[in-house]
Amino acid sequence: MMSEEIIKDVIVGEHEDYIINMGPQHPSTHGVLRLEVCLKGETVKYLVPHVGYIHRGIEKMCEANTYQQIIHLTDRMDYLSAHMNNEAVCMIVEDAMQVEVPERVKYIRTILDELNRIASHQLWWCAFGMDLGALTSFFYGLRDREHILDIFEESFGSRLLHSFVCPGGLMHDVHPNFQKRTKEFVKYFKTKLPEYDQLLTGNIIFQNRAIGIGHMSRETAIGFGVTGPSGRGSNFSCDVRKIAPYGAYDKVQFNEILEPGCDVFARYKVRMAEMWESLSIIEQLIDNIPEGDYTAKMKPIIKLPAGEYFRRVETARGELAVYVVSDGNKSPYRMKFRTPNFSNLFVMNEIASGYKIADLIAISGSLDLVIPDIDR
Amino acid sequence: MLNRQELTDIIREFEPEVIFPDGTQLLEAVVPAEKLFTLIEKLKSDKRTAFNYLIDLTAVDFSTHFTVVYHLDSTDFRHLVVLKSLIADRENPKVDSLTALYPTAEYFEREIFDLFGIRFNNHPNMKRLFLEDDYGYPLRKDFKDEVNIIER
């Protein structure tokens, strides 16, 4: 028997709050992430991210593996920035052992970084469009990404998880076709990138769902450590390529893209502009790759001198920092990855509260989350 | 941007008990755990240092003690400092939370609690982040898992 009060609650609603679980299998979360969303009507009151569905304990595994083996684990964190993750570990080993890598290696690594960044942004762009209901973008993005993956496949034999760099240089030299095909791709993609803008950027339906949504102030971005394109969309200058140049980034001219918009559309514009910048970086480097060895001389067994090392790298999603404590053995005593997505995810409660649940899809898409990077 | 010596002087001015180890890659300062919060608060609010960005917060288990490691950056000046705090108590390790200063610390601290079992005072939500409540603390050096970890 229902008391009058409960009936009143149900109809008029003192307790209108409604908890809904988005994920762990929701397609727009791009991985196994569960968002516990509290709704009042259609408006998000707050949300709690639940992570850990694919926690593999990479940091613990690192303590039992050699540095060469660890490189293959880092692929599996942010699989769309696999090359940058590999490079971070390699650079920390090179720092510690004071190995100077050949110029050729620096150039090739930087080109691969940027190719990887474009591939990642393409996948983000197509998935973001699809999240918001524009299915065509998905085909456009994947079609163009295929060209980059083919270049990767030709040189490294793998398309997604390369593990192509190793401490001191590269596993082997790039394929003789590498330069030619990369130049072809740059030329090709320069004609295709304006299509992206025509399809999505100027689309009024898309703009209405992106402009003014998910406001993240610069202070919020810094406080929550939101880096990468998401942070730069809030005018937070956080590009590690500019702050602490590595590889061949000090030899090229490029702009750090900053947008003052602070909303979903600003983060979108940063990534679109970054693809142009990446193309320009590749163009500046591809004709000037110096001849030389593809690797420096390294000892077969790598032992870092006892001490602590810290390295920051800009991945496609933000700042990856690696912190290693070595006790002089061939495996690290402790290895910590400060992954960009970890910090980028937890700002969601802050920036999604107060918006509609449909905007939540746009917001999580604009942060470009890769869940295995959070869980590690 | 302040250089190493200037930063050292400022930190010493704020907290005379700080020890600076030699020969480190970045500027490191070892701070007593109970002084950590006030020191970081000063480093963040002081106009000369303005450490407003917490890059990384982690812990290391040295078998005899834990070390909590903070990497701080300033978005205005781009200088870095590494602060460390030793916790000798392995049974009930505790250190002050930085959530009030840096919101991102909330989740770094939950991760450390999850993997090391270090508790943070004044933390708004001291729950495990990834693992289940009865799992143990896997990044401790004395962690044993006979099923999943093969001892070599």
Image (cartoon, rainbow, N blue to C red):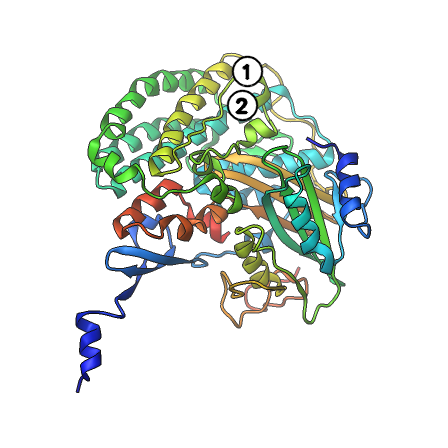
**In screen coordinates, is A32 left or right of A337?**
left
**Secondary structure under the numbered disc 1 in the rendered image:** loop
Question: Dot 2 falls on which chain?
Answer: A
**Secondary structure under the numbered disc 2 in the rendered image:** helix
Inspect the image, locate mark 2, and give the three-letter code of the amino acid beneath it: Ile
As drawn, the residue found furthest toward the top would be A287
- Residue B138 image-quadrant placement: bottom right
Residue at the (57%, 55%) spot, across then down:
B100
Q: Nearer the viewer, residue A177 or A234?
A: A234
Marks 2 and 1 belong to one chain: yes
**In screen coordinates, is A208 left or right of A102?**
left
Q: Can residue A328 be seen in this snapshot?
A: no
**In screen coordinates, is B73 left or right of A349?**
right
Where is mark 1, residue-wise? Answer: A289
Label of residue A108 in the image: 2
Indicate which disc, 2 or 1, sits on the residue closer to the N terminus: 2
Task: Report x, y in % for residue A371.
Answer: 42, 49
* Badge 2 vs badge 1, beta-carbon distance below 8 Å: yes
Image quarter of the N terminus of chain A? bottom left
Q: Is residue A168 above or below residue A77?
A: above
